[in-house]
Structure formats: structure tokens, C-alpha cells
Amino acid sequence: MNVILWVGMRRVKRRKWSSMVLAASSAPIRLEVLKLLSSSGPLSYTEIMMSLQLNPVRDAGKFVYHLRNLMDAGLISLDRKTKKYGITELGGMMVKLARDVDEYVESKGGRLLVRTSRLTIEEFDRGKIVNSLVTEAGAPVGIAQEIAGEVEEKLIKLKTKYLTSPLIREFVNAVLIEKGFEEYRHRLTRLGMPLHDVARLFEDRPALTVTELERRTAHSVLKEYVLLNGVPRRVADAHLSGLIHINGLSEWTLKPDEVFHDLTVFLRRGLPPLDAPTSFGDAVALIEKLCFLTGLEVSRGVVLDSLNVYLAPFVESQDRRVLVEAFKAFLRSPGLGGYGRTLTLSLEASLPSYLKDVEAVGPGGRKEGTYQDYVEEAQTVTECLVEAVREISLKRMPTHVQVLFKMRNGVGERLAEKSLMELASKYALPYFAVCDVEEEVGFTPDGLMIGVDRVKDDLKGYLRSGNLGTVHVNIPRLHYESKGREERFFSLMESSVKAAVEALKSKRNALVKALKGRMLPLLSGEKDPYFSLEDAACVVSFVGLNEVVEARTEKPLHVAEGARYASHMVQFMGKLIKELEVSEELRIKLAQRSCEEGSERLAHVDLEKYGKDALRAEPSSPPYYTDIPLIPLSRKISLSQRVEAEASTQKNLDGGGLAVIPLRRVSVEALCGFNGQVLKAGCKAYTYTMEISHCHRCGFVSEGFLHTCPSCGAEHPIHLGRASAILQPTHMWPESRLRSSVNWVYHEL
């Protein structure tokens, strides 16, 4: 027992100590004083009176009497220097005793029952709050007990008969904030959706499948988790404030964005329970299963690189019709694509030099010469796939699968270009990428380019690897904050890029744990990881480049002055990223990527903050910033100007970009001729887009957004087009782009 307690009780006989202490704390006003000092710490005479809402004139005499009783009993003490009263150890024991009694009485009275997150109903137990504070928040036991006691008092005073775990947690967090324990409050945050938000999802259920409803609710919780615990606080604040946009936030700590498959691994050894394929049909079926399983472990997409080359040894002497039907069955598979994930079938126009001497994997996983022996078969595979896509499109366009055609040195060689251009002119389906014949490089549909290159002293590949994640920098925000000052603008750009890289680094660290813990069974592999984190790229992208160029130079991006300023910005980011690549030990690419959700979110955040000064991609439409295409389709510029502007920007992006070229009423012959002009301009990746109506009844495809089918008269045909990089029905477009599309300009050749 401390000295002060001895002094306060020195005249009291031992057998009367307990009686005196109990008597001193029995008056309600004295017990309130003890609880107040226990929770708030030392207070002055005036502060105690004000906290208890006592009248300094009317209640002064009685209050002095109560304080003297507490001091004589050794329950409180007075610091003569500060003139403040504090609770003693014995006083703290009495507060705890009082709370224990309150808890016992309340629980026996049946008034404090809690509906827990474990779907049970239990009596309130203050000890569980203490345990949560210690285990979840890392709070010391003493602080945890103090907080739990105060929360219990507040709950008892409410006299509510309906307590839930979330409500109790809210009270705990409120008390933590009152006491300045912000870090403990942060760790104790509960994740979940408000009841109203979930109810709205159920109200919208006719427009949502059950799977989609479940996905949205789960993603809501995961997004909160990532922002609270998956990335550093500074990065979370940058995302929430609109400085950056973390793409695929809900799966940020769980999955990589994209995987580039090495098909030889699975064609050689099979994919359990499937053995190594012995025929072309078996090989396609195995690839279908591979795509389905991979789709569960990536957040953005799967790329089957050089698909026609790797399938060539399985062609043998099979009839072309067999190959076409195998591909049609593959394209009809319901397990491909979906929920924002893309499946890219990447085809080689000519055999890359680095594959010529590679041992070919044939039926049964056997070695069958080299891939140089199967050049004609590779072309046959391409032709059969194109034919399968064309036939499927007569009923329903396979927008869930992206066909990408790699032209090496711009030459299609013996490929039947006319059939591919027919897909482009009628269905706007294929994507085109350009690279050298010896260049080992893969592309995604939105133009992301990852190849074999050197980082520091290491040679990095891309097969059995891919892209970990993408973060977009909000360039218009830098324009607003810099207020016209160039030095400030680029300083903010540097800090934004660093925040993006910090987010990417946190994702890499999370995926190390995910792969080691076999959360991603396919990518983790059996013994050695299939997916190489060491080779994987991280991508920094941007939105609003076009708007900022116009705002800062008063010139459009497609003219010389605007193009120079755009190049200056992109080169600045590229140089900074190369420096960070070394210092952070990450493989980082700067790319122009699709960001439909982020471009709209960031524009709305900026509109709320900056009002009429906020920039827009389309001044007369709902707010969004440009991503892909680089220049809004509403701009009335020539096709050559658009293509040259895209090509000029792509030259400064080591991670690539995609030129979207809007056309109408185009013939196959005219498109073949124009395609040469695009290649000459220097675009590394591009696609053609147009307005398409596809009849859900007869499958007839016509140009333009029509209200009825010209063939069978059915109403409301499906409207398709590109809001950004991916061809999809317009009902899946962001609202801002759907409404602005009435002003988009499509060109005749």
C-alpha cells in the first residue's frame, strides 16, 4: 500500500479499513468522482465539478465534504504542486469492483445480451473487450481494462435490449478516439458494408446475378482491408484523396494482375487430372482448363503467348474442320473470361527467331523436332482460329476472348490477312501488335508490353510471369495543386509516382506470402513456383494526360507544342521510374493502361474538390479523365493526326499503350491499305473500333447503334463498342462514357 494511503488511514484501525473504504465509495457522487479520475487522469477541483455538471456555488460545500471523505479513505490524493486530484491504487480497485458488480447485476437481469459475429447470443462480458484490445490492437492490459470498463458503463446507461458486436466495437473505437489512442482504433476497425448498401444491392438484384451480388459484397470488405492493412497509410490516403488510383483494389494483396503462360510446360506434362495431350482436341481442352484455373488466381487477365506456334505440332494430318470445331468448343466455354478478366489468344504472324531452334512439344509430351519444322502448321492454326471466331460471331460475338495478332517487322507473311481484316472491319475484334522478328515480348489487349530485358545485372523474362499490378497517377490533380508553377507540378508528379511504386512494392510483398502459403495453387506450383515474382513487372500508368496538356499549353495534344509537352511529362515519369527500379529492386514499367473505374472516380473526386475549375475529357458530359484512347473520340481530328499522336506517346512508354482507331463504313480492302499507314506511323499496339449492333435473335451484325434488327426485325439488338480498350456491350460501359459517346467521331476510309 502506497505512502499516501498510509497517511490517509493512519488513524484507522485495521479491522475498520474495509468498512471505511466501502462507506467512502458508497455515495453515488463519490463513485462518479472515482470513475472520472480513473478514466480521465488527474483533474483540478473545478474540472471535476464541471465534468460532473455540479454548480460551483450551490454544491461547493457538499462537494468539499465528499472529496475529504475520499481522501480520508485513501481512495484519492491531492498533488500540492499541480492542485490536481488523482486516483490511488485502492481507488482503482474500488472502481473495478463497482464495475464488476454492475456487470454481474446487469447480466443476471438479462438486459445485456449480445448478438455476436459468430451468430450466437451471449451475455455481455467485459473481458472479451479486453481480449480484443490486447490481441487485435496490441494495447497494454491496463489500458485495455480501463477502456473496457468505460465502454461497459456507457452501454449500461443506454439501457438498450439489443446489443450487437459491431455496436460494441463502435463504442470501443469512440472511447479510444476520446483518449487519443488513434493507432489502437485503426487496428480495431471493423470491416463490412452498411446495411443500407447491402439492401440496395438486393433491390437491384434483377440486374445482378447472385454470383455478382456475392462478389460485390466480398470485394467491398476486401477493399476496406487493403486500405486499412494492405498498403502503407500514406498510400491509402493518396488513393482515397484521388492522387492515385490502385487498380483492382479488392484483390491487391491476393492475386497478380496478369499472367503470361508458357504453354510448353502444360503440353509436356499435362494438368492434373489431365495427362499430356495426345491430339489437337486434347491440347485445346487442356488449355481451356488451364485458362479457367488461372482465371481464379489473377485479377485482370491471362495471355496465351504464341498460341499458334505451340499448338502447331498437334495439327499433324488432321482435317481443318476438326481444328475449327475444337476452337469453337473452346470459345463457347462459359468458364473463360468474365468479371473484368480478359483472355488473350496471342498469335504470331511469323515464327520468332528465338523459337526456331527450341525443341517442339508434341502429342504425349514428346519432343518433335523444333518449332522451325512447323511453320505451315502454325499458319493453319491461325487460320482455323480466325475461322472459328468468324463462325461463332454469326450467333454471338465472343467478346470474352481477345484475339491479338503479333506482326514482326510489320509483315504478316503468308497469313491470310484478308480474313483477319474481315474480323476487324465487321466485328472490330482483333488487336494488332508490332515487334521485331527477334524480339521476345508479350502484349495484353490494352497494349501493355512486357518482354525480355535487363534490370540492373539480371535478365528478366515474361513467360511464367506477368504483371503484378497497376497504379494510375492522377495528372489533373497535379495540375490543380501546382497552380501553374512548373517546378511544383513536377515535384508533385515525383511524389505521386513514388506513392504508386510504394503501393506496388506492398503488393509484391503480399504476393510473396500468398505464393509461399499456396493461396494460389496453380501459380505456386508443386515444388517450385510456376509464377516468377522475380521476373514480374509492376506498372505505373496515368489518366488525364490529354486534359493537362490542353490546360497547361492551351494547345491540343495532336499538334507539335502539345505533343512536346506530353512527351516531356511522360519522359520525366519514365526517367524517375528507372531510378526507382534500381533503388526499390522492382521491375517497373510505365504504360498507358485502361482505367475505366479509376478515370471516373478520380474525376468525380476532383470535381467535388475544385468545382468549376476541374478538367473533363468531355466538357459537356459527366466527368471522367482520358486513359485509352489517349485523345477523346469526340475530338474532330483526322485519323492520321490521331494515329501519329498515339504513336508519338507510345515511343516514350517502355510498358506500351494502345491506339484505338474509330472507323465506320469500312471495306476489307480499304482497311488492308490503311493498316500499312498505321504500321508506318510507328504504333506498337492498336485496334479498330466502331459502333456495332448484334441481333440476339438471328445473330445478324450491322454497323451503328440500331433500335431494330435489319434482318429479322427484332427489337433492342445488343450494342457493342469500345469505351476504352475492350470491346463490350454498351450496358457494361461506365455511365460517363456511354453518355459522351453520342459525340464521338468515327471516320470513313
Image (spheres, rainbow, N blue to C red):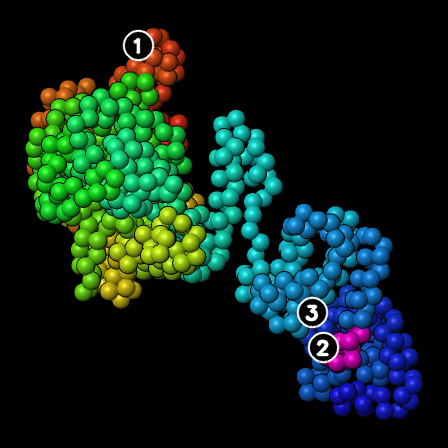
Residue identifier under label 1: 710
Residue identifier under label 3: 146
Of 176 and 412, nearer the camera is 412
| Relative horizontal placement of residue 682, taking residue 240 as reference (left or right) | left
On whether residue 90 falls in the magenta region, the answer is yes
- Real-space Cα distance between discs 1 and 3? 75 Å
Residue at figure coordinates x 62%, y 64% from the top left: 133
Residue at figure coordinates x 32%, y 49% from the top left: 470
Q: Quadrant of residue 8?
A: bottom right
SS class, disc 2: strand
Q: Where is residue 349 in the image (x, y as percent from the top left)?
A: 13, 35
SS class, disc 1: loop
Q: In the rendered structure, which segment of residues is drawn in magenta?
A: 86-95
Of 487 and 265, nearer the camera is 265
Q: Where is residue 237 in the image (x, y as percent from the top left)?
A: 43, 56
Residue identifier under label 2: 44
